[in-house]
Image (cartoon, rainbow, N blue to C red):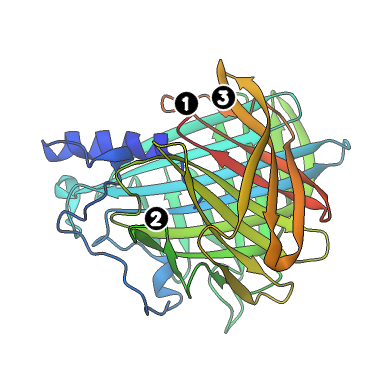
Amino acid sequence: MNVSICSILALGLLVGSAAGGHTQGFAGLGSTAQGFAVPKPGMHFHFPADHAPHPDFRIEWWYVTANLKGTDGLDYGAQWTLFRSAAAPGEKAGWSSPQVWMGNAAVTTPDRQFSAERTARGGIGQAGVTITPFDAWIDEWALKATSVAVGSDELSKLTMSATGTDFGYQLNLEAKGPVVPQGDNGYSVKSAEGQASYYYSQPFYSISGTLRLAGKSVEVTGKAWLDREWSSQPLAVDQKGWDWFSLHFDDGSKMMGFRLRDTSGGGFTSGTWISPDGKPTDIASNELKVTPLKNALAAGRDVPVEWRLELPEKNLDFTVSALNNDSWVRSQFPYWEGPIRISGNRSGVGYLEMTGY
């Protein structure tokens, strides 16, 4: 999943203003398609074409999270995100474009959270995504391909850069495994009512580069995960937020899992198990059990910072805990997102995003 509801709400507000109308429903996502295209089962991804925008759908994102280790011995996290939201299907040139873009960037340390955001109108060159070579940008922030070998995917080698007040990064990503479809061959169901998205990931990046924090630089290496997702009605009307996990296990396997919380106090869970060679296995709806164990205050909000995840089908029973309990992205539309550590009958690292708290 990996998209901030609050950030998408911001896009919904901007798009509504740009269109001279109302916002697009809950979090700018909505539970009805309102003339936009709708994901359907049986679609097959086509690369590199599907790395580009899909303007007939209401919302999509290009989203990278990274677990990093510094030469100073400390653990870090980094995030780079570009969101696209639309007031109407399709694209038009110039200021007539119905597209609005938002970028989020963050760096997490054991005791601080740095973050920044950018917004842009479509059609005027301030933000966008192109392929061959792949380039996603908003202002000077960029996620772009470098030295793509013949026959390789456009996302196989990337540079990632962003700056904010007192922080910035320049990072290099290289994929060590294949692009992976999430859900049922890329069709990811988000509710019992059948709302869904198209969703794939590149979870096999090795990453290296430099973080700049409060005027000091540190060299880092680690693992990164890129998510691509688009839809027009991915949420049910009673869903109020989600908890999303991307996990790198020490044995080379990966897992994506999420819980969408509803107003009755229940939730809808799903995910994908990914073998070390990149073979995905869909986790059936509500087979994954996600239980909060410990809460902490983040920006005055009570949020879970330690979780137990259970997946009996894979004999998984482990705990994840936050590197920094106060990983609150203090933007105009805030949410919690930061690196986590895995312990129990599996070990490793990952990322957690929580919205709606």
Quarter of the image holding residue 323? top right
- What is the number of the mark on residue 331? 1
Let me know if residue 207 appears in the view: no
Do tag 3 and tag 1 residues touch (Cβ < 8 Å)? no
Please name the residue that numbered disc 2 is placed on: 191
Decide which of 239, 152 is in the foreground and name it. 239
Tell me the CA gap for discs 3 and 1. Answer: 12 Å
Vertical placement of residue 21 versus 280, above or below: above
Q: Is residue 94 left or right of residue 73?
A: left
Q: Where's residue 122, x and y in %?
A: 27, 48
Tell me the CA gap for discs 2 and 1. Answer: 28 Å
Check the image and name the residue furthest to the top. Answer: 300
- Tally of marks: 3
Q: Where's residue 337, x and y in %?
A: 59, 37
Q: Say which label, 2 or 1, has the lower sequence index.
A: 2
- What is the number of the mark on residue 165? 3
Vertical placement of residue 58 versus 264, above or below: below
